[in-house]
Image: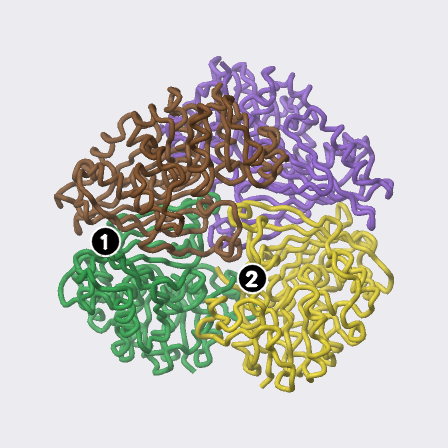
Chain colours: A brown, B purple, C yellow, D green
Amino acid sequence: MIRVRVVGAGGFGGANIIELLAAHPRTEIVSLVDVNGVGKPISSAHTHLKGFCDMPVESPDAAKWDGGIDVVFCATPDGVGMTLAQKCIKAGAKLIDYSGDFRFNTKEAYASYATRIGRDLKHAAPQLLARAVYGVAELHRDAIAGASIVGNPGCFAVSALLGLAPAIKNHLIDPDTVICDAKTGVSGAGIKPSAAFHYPLRYENMNAYKIAAHQHTIEVERELSLLAGKELRVTLTTQIVPLTRGIMTIVYGRLAKSATTADQLYDAYAEFYRGATFVRVEPTGVPVSNNDVRGSNMAVISTNVDPRTGQMIVVSHIDNLMKGQAGSALQNMNIMFGLDEATGLRRPAYYP
Amino acid sequence: MIRVRVVGAGGFGGANIIELLAAHPRTEIVSLVDVNGVGKPISSAHTHLKGFCDMPVESPDAAKWDGGIDVVFCATPDGVGMTLAQKCIKAGAKLIDYSGDFRFNTKEAYASYATRIGRDLKHAAPQLLARAVYGVAELHRDAIAGASIVGNPGCFAVSALLGLAPAIKNHLIDPDTVICDAKTGVSGAGIKPSAAFHYPLRYENMNAYKIAAHQHTIEVERELSLLAGKELRVTLTTQIVPLTRGIMTIVYGRLAKSATTADQLYDAYAEFYRGATFVRVEPTGVPVSNNDVRGSNMAVISTNVDPRTGQMIVVSHIDNLMKGQAGSALQNMNIMFGLDEATGLRRPAYYP
Amino acid sequence: MIRVRVVGAGGFGGANIIELLAAHPRTEIVSLVDVNGVGKPISSAHTHLKGFCDMPVESPDAAKWDGGIDVVFCATPDGVGMTLAQKCIKAGAKLIDYSGDFRFNTKEAYASYATRIGRDLKHAAPQLLARAVYGVAELHRDAIAGASIVGNPGCFAVSALLGLAPAIKNHLIDPDTVICDAKTGVSGAGIKPSAAFHYPLRYENMNAYKIAAHQHTIEVERELSLLAGKELRVTLTTQIVPLTRGIMTIVYGRLAKSATTADQLYDAYAEFYRGATFVRVEPTGVPVSNNDVRGSNMAVISTNVDPRTGQMIVVSHIDNLMKGQAGSALQNMNIMFGLDEATGLRRPAYYP
Amino acid sequence: MIRVRVVGAGGFGGANIIELLAAHPRTEIVSLVDVNGVGKPISSAHTHLKGFCDMPVESPDAAKWDGGIDVVFCATPDGVGMTLAQKCIKAGAKLIDYSGDFRFNTKEAYASYATRIGRDLKHAAPQLLARAVYGVAELHRDAIAGASIVGNPGCFAVSALLGLAPAIKNHLIDPDTVICDAKTGVSGAGIKPSAAFHYPLRYENMNAYKIAAHQHTIEVERELSLLAGKELRVTLTTQIVPLTRGIMTIVYGRLAKSATTADQLYDAYAEFYRGATFVRVEPTGVPVSNNDVRGSNMAVISTNVDPRTGQMIVVSHIDNLMKGQAGSALQNMNIMFGLDEATGLRRPAYYP
């Protein structure tokens, strides 16, 4: 059994990975860490886990870093994983970090990201950056398999990248015209209450935020630039709509050849994702929606063109808490430990 | 493997049992029947099942009733199960029917129910009524184990009965003072669109309906009368609130002894449900909510008294589509086939 | 013009009364007070008011209590109104207080209430209690007309009282059997974010709270006792359902004469509310719902009996922020100033 | 008083204009027409109107076209207004039509539109097309003032046009790079129930539809082309998110001069809408949301640029049933009859 620690057990990202791990045939949760609820069963915070996981929460100070752990999920905000990483690696455990702490491989790249989120530009464990692998399995499966540290991707980044990668890789669109219009459910903002997510102010509401400034833009640009073989920039507009789970990103790009048909686009996407368990590509005209992904690890992608304007219009659906977070994290763990990447992740979307 | 047919595959009740069966280690779906979508994969109607169950739908006329089926779930409205039951039994299959067709054991009792829902008072298979068992496992586990026909209970009835049974059985309340105030999510009304459940008219809406007239009242009264050892009547008020999955029924009854404490009440409930996998009883002061049951087969019950008024106040939460329908149906199947009753049903509630 | 101050302008109750006052033909807002947002226009907190009311917010300390104000709305939590009341009255202004501070006329009655909400049992202005009038216009219109201090009623209390008053007054039910099962939308909990009302934890959720302990019970009992001519107690179960505006309270009572028909009940209610602008009584069988009251000052009441069990079942719908709060407050102001009580309050419910 | 007939009184668009007219100081509703609910008060269909408008519904056949009507609102789907227009004009009444019937001035332009929605390409009253005026007051106020027929704009078109007009008119963006990413609430689909808007299938759901094919594209292109002084085409992607009222359209265009600042953009928009009662422009950094417009006739527009990519990003919020439909219709009526265009339309957004 793979022995697992979850740091940040008390958030949504913690709850979701605990739920997945509790049902996983090859993992054993051995430690749950959080600053809140210390000493109480995790199921007193996440009551839906009663009877499924009632392990008490440890404080970060009390958590021992010895040889008894094989993998650590840092389901924590930016800045936590980087402080634990050295201890973790030294104790022989692999690390999967949800935040931006290990999505970049150089101090400079990290600093550029840190600027966007208003954090200290100095990384706490710069010596480990080079070994971190960016955890989008559909792009970096082999590197993940050999990694000891995985930087789990941002939720918007997953949805945008899965929607754009085949087009950029195959030079189907002009890489300087990419627009990502992304709508997320509210759970992406985490478990901490705030005015913006207070029920009476959020039901029936929607808004764009961090316009031209969202930090996930950087990882999207880095990955697409790798695929394009040239530096590119994207416009990403993040929005919040009144639902809990789900991201729908519509990605636009001017077709490199205006005669490219929807069928050709579909073929390129289907080919790119051949063998990808968790990506389903649908041709124009097949309805797709958040109902296809809510609660599941699937990404569902609809490929379209507007021949009148020469635009590619790709709709990319994921569940921000699954493929956008805990699901991808577990998929990465499976790959890191040589398991079938779908182990413990095969479940259909919530319905209705 | 237990070979299963689902009749009424295209509804919510069909979708849910298919999803559960597809993940069940001991069942094999061999036939899906519906009047809609014939010839197409069930996943074209329930797209969340793509990759999980893509079996084509058979028409009722085409479905063969030979020896190849071990159990049939009739996830159908009133009046369908009774027309299939004889063929089903003759073909050697057990029957689990979601409707009221087999919740009663005499023609007269059925007629009383049929009156309430405006149906023909004559049952189509009266000779089978005597062998039908009422499918609330917590009340009739042994009889279900030996049954060939199970009448799956009404969703409101499950929630009311689980909330009342220990109090009535132990004579803790005056059986002539029972009030059940029941709120359901919208999925209880099924998959068929109607004005009352049109999104713009249902969001931010709530209402009572079938006041003093809901058909589930009859099965609640029958079961409680059996437990009380005397005929009793209950007031049941059914209401719809703007959520999709969940029933919260608050049951009231005047305490037989006004000095009964909340602790005593809790003890009686805890004792009654000792060993019941899918019922969790919580004492006064422990918060319970729909979040504890949504998507799961659990019933969660909070036991309270108002010492000022001498009232018992028990809050009973279930997911109407799980413990209130498909979950109970599968639990019954497990019992009928000698399996652990929780097989394929152990999953926590949806969260968040 | 009636010159108005609103204390607690930054909450939902403040926002609603400001909105109503801004459209009222006979009022002029002259002062908005709050501890937050001081110096900024109120519309920077409540952005929907931009262009309708952009008056800057004053701090409580800065607000002058001289002769320039005719009426003060304290849209504040318990404990604020009582500290301002003396200054207010001395300055010649009338006071309408949203909290429980002036719902009771004796120190003892207030202390009993204060116990329930965990506040200091000592009232800060006990000398003013005797002159306070309880602000349910349908019960105390004449007294309100002559009052200088009105204690605006609790939202649950309004819905329960309007649903019960005619039955109790006319001795149609046994006053010792009253149960109020009350469901509220989330706005009743105010504008302050908390875990219980964080969107991801509240959508698809419902729960009972303060079982057998809600403080509004006391004012319901006091008013019904006055109507009954004897002391009575009620069981009140408060619940939260996932919508923003609305309360649906179902009130139960054993019919004094079990032969009482729904028609007789309806007639008694219709007679009781003859001339009441903001109460509409509907007979059994006419659908009523939260859609009839959301955003409006109407109370809509459906009268029913269950002849099988001898229970009265009355469904009482209000908008908790209108008839349950700001709407009643303005209705009271109209009465206190000799205006038609509906002035500025005639608007239909939000739809859809 | 302006005597008004509403055709299509039973839909959401009918309900909204009736509500507005009932509160309008200068209008009198004299006739309500619908195919459903004939002979019954309109308030039996729209129960929130009880006491506000209880006029009985006339059948289309019974409705007389004589001199007693000054203006007709056709709150009807495509194809109805064109069959009534001649009778209406002949009877001396002005016509405001909600559908696409009178948004175009030539048979050819209409045919192009009709193709998109699968209707007969032949217009039923081609002789009237030339006199129809497109009803976006902010673009055509003077022409509307003199019009006898106004084609009320499509809801998506209003939101896109208000977001784009100043940029196109002032040549701030390359007119060949316009993308409109539009999200609507569910009420835009009307009152008729369907699977896509069945509560259990729509809550927590979102999806794009009619990709590269929405009929409102045509009127957006026509109007922008007029402003640009050249033919242009736009990409419009329409999406449905789980709320009832509101459209948020994000419009993108490549800045003509990449050095254009957000301030310059804001100034151009503020200038363009100087004097427009129902458009509020907000600079970058001022939060705007659907809460600013829900239930009101306001359009709220946030002006932004992404200097890294040279994109303009403008967020345009309206309520689809108000500025996107009934509100614009009434604004147009006010203009047509020489009234202040805001008469009967000054009300803040619903909150909370």
B259 to C344, vertically: above or below:
above
Q: Which mark is residue D309?
A: 1
Report x, y in % for residue C328: 64, 70
Q: Position of residue A170 (x, y in %)?
A: 18, 36
Disc 1 packing (10 Å; few <14; some 14–19; many ≥20):
many
- Chain letter of disc 2 in the image: C
Q: Quadrant of residue A44?
A: top right
Residue ID at (79%, 62%): C121
Q: Left of A150 or right of it: where is C243?
A: right
User: What distance separates the C-alpha of mark 1 from that of mark 2?
Assistant: 45 Å
The residue that label 2 is drawn on is C294
Label 1 element class: loop
Q: Residue at x 74, y 73 (%)?
A: C140
Q: Position of residue D291 (x, y in %)?
A: 45, 61
Q: Is residue A69 placed above or below D4 in the rendered structure?
A: above
Given residues C72 and B20, the one toward you in this image is C72
| Mark 1 chain | D
Residue C4 placement (x, y as % from top left): 60, 79
